[in-house]
Image (spheres, rainbow, N blue to C red):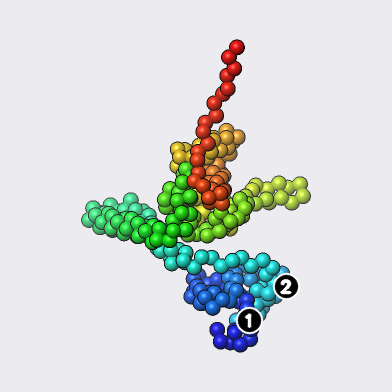
Amino acid sequence: MEWLKRHKVKRVGIEASGGYEQAAVAELRRQRFVVIVFQPIQVRAYATFHLQRAKNDKMDAALIAACTAAVKKIHPAPDPRLQPFAVHLTMIDQIKEDIAKLKNRLESCPDERVQKFWKEQIALLAKHRRAEFKALVAAIRKHRDLAARLDLIYSVGGSGLPTAVAILIRMPEIGQITREQAAALTGLAPYDDDSGKHVGARRIDGGRQRLRQALYTAALPASFRWNPQLMALYSRLIAAGKGHKRALVACARKLIVIINAVVARGTPWVAEPPRTASVSVT
């Protein structure tokens, strides 16, 4: 910090390293530095563009500095209150993943004693997961603005409380971006793959993995029961010959677009009433 201030550095670039950079990033921002966190693929792409193949620590530092200087648009730093919530939510997700692994072991285990052990572990983890999620929601609701945003997200049909919490924490930009940006950040935007006369299949790519998983999981019940708009979209896509998974991806994308609009508008979601045919009597 002293060196940066002495040399009047105002912008700092850091390559993400699986979370090890978070403490440094938080302290730099607390000291009012502008911090840009790069994904490793961004830095290597910049090196490839400049035909730089050699790699060592000194060269990487110079490369990251060049990337930092080249950035034209600097996004505002995320709400620092969300970082501990993100850590807590990841732990809850990991407990869910552990439960799934234990269920797989249970299915393939013929021994009754071992089965009993796995069942006890699954029940214990499920209890912990419920308690931790309840504690996370309570912590969020201590902040009036975050609680209001959570309620707006939760108001949308098909966005259950776990999905709403995931969106609030993992997508702090919600309500402040375009529908296209919302789809891209969640990894649900279809990208072209065309060249000349070749028209390739559109595919989703990138985005925030855990957030995409939460939305895709929510899309199934939303498209079959809870959200009339998504139910109509799913039926229309299936009738047009689209596969089940592709239709669900489209519904997940539509769900985040609706939520983004609701948060931007600042009023709870209201389901569109069913259309009724007008009959003229003569």
In the picture, the quarter occupied by the N terminus is bottom right
Q: Quadrant of residue 246?
A: top right
**Amino acid beneath label 2:** His
Q: Alpha carbon of mark 1 to alpha carbon of mark 2: how far?
A: 25 Å
In the picture, the quarter occupied by the C terminus is top right
Residue 206: horizontal and vertical position, in percent?
58, 58
Which residue is pictured at 50% across the width and 70% down the height?
Answer: 18
Q: For mark 1, does the 10 Å Cα neighbourhood hold few (<14), some (14 to 19), or many (20 or more) residues?
A: few
Q: Is residue 274 above or below residue 215?
A: above
Q: Which-is-in-front pick, marks 1 and 2?
A: 1
Residue 174: horizontal and vertical position, in percent?
54, 55
The answer to whether residue 56 is left or right of residue 112 is right
Which residue is pictured at 45% across the width and 38% down the height?
Answer: 225
Q: Which residue is mark 2?
A: 50
The reply to whether residue 256 is visible in this rendering is no
Q: For mark 2, does the 10 Å Cα neighbourhood hold few (<14), some (14 to 19), or many (20 or more) residues?
A: few
Q: Describe the element under mark 1 as helix, strand or loop.
A: loop
Q: Residue furthest top?
A: 282
Residue 13: horizontal and vertical position, in percent?
61, 75
Residue 182: horizontal and vertical position, in percent?
58, 53
Which residue is pictured at 26% across the width and 56% down the height?
Answer: 120
Q: Residue furthest right?
A: 196
Q: Is residue 5 above or below residue 227?
A: below
Count of numbered badges drawn on the protein: 2
Q: Which residue is mark 1?
A: 9
* Disc nearer the start of the sequence (1/2): 1
Which residue is pictured at 71% across the width and 50% down the height?
Answer: 194
The answer to whether residue 54 is left or right of residue 258 is right
Q: Nearer the viewer, residue 56 or 236?
A: 236
Q: Describe the element under mark 2 as helix, strand or loop.
A: loop
Q: Nearer the viewer, residue 207 or 2?
A: 2
**Amino acid beneath label 1:** Val
